[in-house]
Image: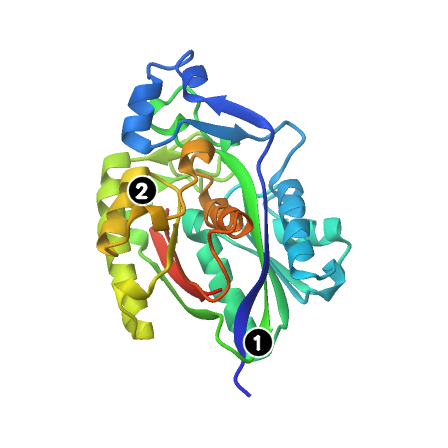
Amino acid sequence: MSRYSTLLGTGGYLPETILTNDQIAQTVETSDAWIVERTGIRQRRIAAPHETASSMAEIAARQALDAAGLEPGDLDLIIVATGTPDRIFPSTACLLQQRLGVRECASFDVQAACSGFIFALSVADQFIRAGSARRALVVGSEVYSRIVDWSDRATCVLFGDGAGAAVIGVSDQPGLLSTHIHSDGQYQNLLYAPNPANNNGLRDEGRFLKMEGNEVFKIAVNTLGRIVDETLEANGLDKSDIDWLVPHQANIRIITATAKKLRMPMARVVVTIENQGNTSAASIPLALNEAIRDGRIRRGQTVLMEAFGAGFAWGSALLRY
């Protein structure tokens, strides 16, 4: 019997605190109009002091398990995608495992920045197809507010906090049709977050995220166009066969460029960036969860998810929900 992965349930969590563009404009030289025009963002959520990647992941994970009709003990694999872990080690996945009261199932983190959820989903899919797991929890959880320089106009307007989760399980019918992941480390200095505890003899890079926004934008648009073509070709599909695009929520201009590549109207693109900002590895599962729960994405529809992030690392996942 062939083994495939299928999506069983999703969940999400956003912190209560809302930070608007007007509030940011009180501390740096910017405006609501400037931010909206260039990014599509109007507000973002900011984690409370007691909240962490693992605590937010727990809330999203329990929602996803409830939606799947499962208990934490039914899991045999937990993967967390995060660039803002609670600790360097143990993994945030192990901390989440403890929060869920699960013991012994494999739990580990994946670090692929904004593409982290796609990478983690791809890994979980391989475990299930190989027969090494039957039910996997995949979570993207980020607290970027703690690695952003709030005096840097170029980056502080972009990011927000949150967590999204998905539970996938084994099926004899294709659900997760394919995943495609790529990386190219030659661009590492265009978007990165330093580790202030270990600079390995390099210059002191501080503690905040660094980004060359214009360069990242240009490469992202071209690269995402290629991953769309790769995904469609691998599955023998036409652009018209895609019902929904669920993109990483980095910039509305990147999202609209990808939709144009697919000849897809924006009404069939799930966009959350306006009220959430860029939540990195959490953005795709948060958007997917929102569109499933509000009834836009329905069973039997074909969903394309794609992301681009630091590394550079980029990828896609094609889902028949």
Tell me if label 1 and label 2 are in contact, CB under 8 Å. Answer: no
Q: In the rendered structure, which amino acid carries the disc numbered 2?
A: Asn
* Label at residue 288: none
Q: Is residue 74 left or right of residue 258?
A: right
Q: Residue lying farthest bottom?
A: 1
Vertical placement of 84 versus 168: above or below?
above
Residue 42 position within the rendered picture, expressed as x and y whole percent measured from the top left = 40, 27
The residue to which callout 1 is attached is 171
CA separation, marks 1 and 2? 41 Å
Mark 2 burial class by Cα count in 10 Å: few <14, some 14-19, many 20+: some
The residue lying toward the viewer, choosing from 212 and 176, is 176
Mark 1 burial class by Cα count in 10 Å: few <14, some 14-19, many 20+: some
The residue lying toward the viewer, choosing from 160 and 151, is 160
The residue to which callout 2 is attached is 189
Vertical placement of 131 versus 240: above or below?
below
Among the 4 quarters of the image, the one containing residue 170: bottom right
Residue 300 position within the rendered picture, expressed as x and y whole percent measured from the top left = 47, 67
Q: Residue lying farthest top?
A: 26
The residue lying toward the viewer, choosing from 32 and 127, is 32
Q: Residue at image x 23%, y 36%?
A: 214
Among the 4 quarters of the image, the one containing residue 213: top left
Number of labelled discs? 2
Q: Quadrant of the N terminus?
A: bottom right
Q: Residue at image x 28%, y 50%?
A: 259
Whichever of labels 1 and 2 marks the residue nearer the N terminus, that label is: 1
Asked if one can make out residue 244 in the rendered structure from this viewpoint, the answer is: yes
